Image (spheres, grey):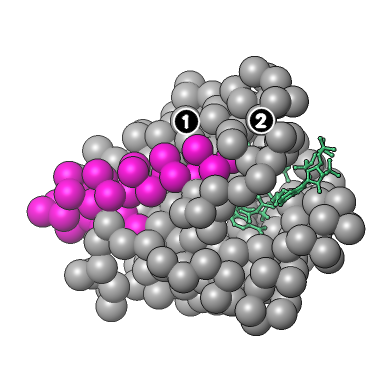
């Protein structure tokens, strides 16, 4: 029987590429999104992958949504916590709302996504937890105190989950993408992107969503069973850990 994979924020950007790559590998995929109904409908139309709408920052909504996915497709074997947002501002201008929104989605959202799925993975003695962190959680970034804090926090989550899940056949790993050509990056002012960011990427280009999706496919596979608590950096040598 096909394994079931859940991809939060799986309807566009990096998540879209992950959903498609997992489907191509034979997984039964559920993709979630927050509010962009039009994009989600077009994604389902193009791929045949079912989408579900809930806010990952809301625990009860996540729990109910995950229960629905499992009722529709079966127990979730692979969870990709990918949904994320930016609310960039220099710290002196950052509002508590900008802090709280980013923490709610990027950090609490990972708890809310994995926590309802975890007991079933423990019972079935198999699971793959993959969190999409960021280069900026590794190195920090001007204008991203909120975002960098959450993405560094995501690494703490997988390092701890790895130790708790190892004997139950569950691995937990993170991918730290560099700058990838999605709407999130296109929201950066063009002059900042062209003058301050791209020149810092030795590869001389943005990454492609598919380059992250291929890392996810590997981490989801049986072949990656001894890789646990790790971080794969995919950033064109912009930051070498
Ligand atoms: N390093 C040093 N100085 C910087 C800087 C940087 N990276 N970016 C901006 N500055 C400086 C500017 O040169 C300017 O200096 P002057 O005042 O001397 O001219 C000053 O900071 C701008 O200050 P402002 O108060 O005018 O800043 P602002 O309110 O316009 O906001 C910003 C600036 C929102 C941080 C904007 O620069 C920005 O969006 N930067 C990009 C941040 C970024 O990389 N975000 C990543 C988004 S994608 C993502 O997050 C995905 C991922 O995981 C990689
Ligand atoms: P994106 O193009 O902006 O897509 C974000 C996806 O997440 C969308 O499907 C969106 O749904 C969903 N989402 C956002 N907030 C949500 C919420 N509260 N609840 C449920 N779903 C939510 O972003 P991306 O660039 O693909 O980024 C995906 C992940 O990679 C994020 O975690 C990001 O931090 C990380 N990342 C990105 C880059 C990069 O350069 N792009 C680099 C490193 C890490 P809607 O369509 O409904 O809005």
Q: Please give the name of the residue rendered at 67% of the width and 69% of the height, measured from the top-left corner.
A: 200
229 vs 36, left or right, is left
Residue tagged 2: 91
Q: Estimate how packed mark 2 is, as few (under 14), some (14 to 19) or many (20 or more) residues with alpha carbons within 10 Å.
A: few
| Callout 2 secondary element | helix
Name the image quarter holding residue 87. Answer: top right
Quadrant containing the C terminus is bottom left
22 vs 41, left or right, is left
Residue 27 visible (yes or no): no
Q: Please give the name of the residue rendered at 75% of the width and 56% of the height, measured from the top-left corner.
A: 185
Ligand 1 within 8 angstroms of badge 2 C-beta: no
Alpha carbon distance from label 2 to label 1: 21 Å
Residue 192 visible (yes or no): yes
Above or below — where is 25 with respect to 232?
A: below
| Callout 1 secondary element | helix
Q: Please give the name of the residue rendered at 56% of the width and 52% of the height, measured from the top-left corner.
A: 136
- The magenta segment is 147-173
Residue tagged 1: 108
21 vs 192, left or right, is left
Look at the magenta stretch and give its main secondary structure: helix
Ligand 2 within 8 angstroms of badge 1 C-beta: no
Name the image quarter holding residue 194. Answer: bottom right
| Viewer-closest of 21 and 51 | 21
């Amino acid at each position: 029987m096909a394994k079931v994979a859940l991809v939060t924020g799986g309807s566009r950007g990096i998540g879209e590429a992950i959903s498609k790559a997992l489907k191509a590998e034979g997984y039964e995929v559920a993709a979630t999104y927050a509010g962009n109904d039009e994009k989600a409908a077009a994604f389902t139309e193009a791929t045949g992958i079912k989408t579900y709408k809930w806010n990952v920052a809301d625990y009860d909504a996540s729990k109910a949504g995950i229960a629905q996915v499992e009722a529709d497709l079966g127990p979730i074997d692979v969870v990709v916590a990918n949904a994320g947002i930016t609310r960039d501002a220099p710290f002196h201008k950052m509002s508590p709302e900008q802090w709280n929104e980013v923490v709610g989605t990027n950090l609490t959202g990972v708890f809310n996504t994995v926590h309802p799925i975890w007991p079933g993975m423990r019972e079935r003695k198999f699971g793959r937890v993959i969190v999409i962190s960021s280069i900026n959680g590794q190195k920090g970034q001007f204008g991203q105190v909120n975002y960098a804090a959450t993405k560094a926090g995501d690494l703490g989550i997988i390092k701890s989950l790895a130790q708790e899940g190892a004997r139950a056949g569950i691995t937990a790993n993170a991918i730290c993408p560099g700058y990838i050509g999605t709407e999130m990056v296109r929201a950066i002012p063009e002059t900042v992107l062209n003058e301050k960011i791209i020149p810092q990427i030795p590869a001389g280009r943005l990454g492609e969503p598919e380059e992250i999706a291929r890392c996810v496919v590997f981490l989801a596979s049986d072949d990656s069973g001894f890789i646990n608590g790790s971080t794969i950096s995919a950033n064109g040598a912009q930051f070498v850990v």
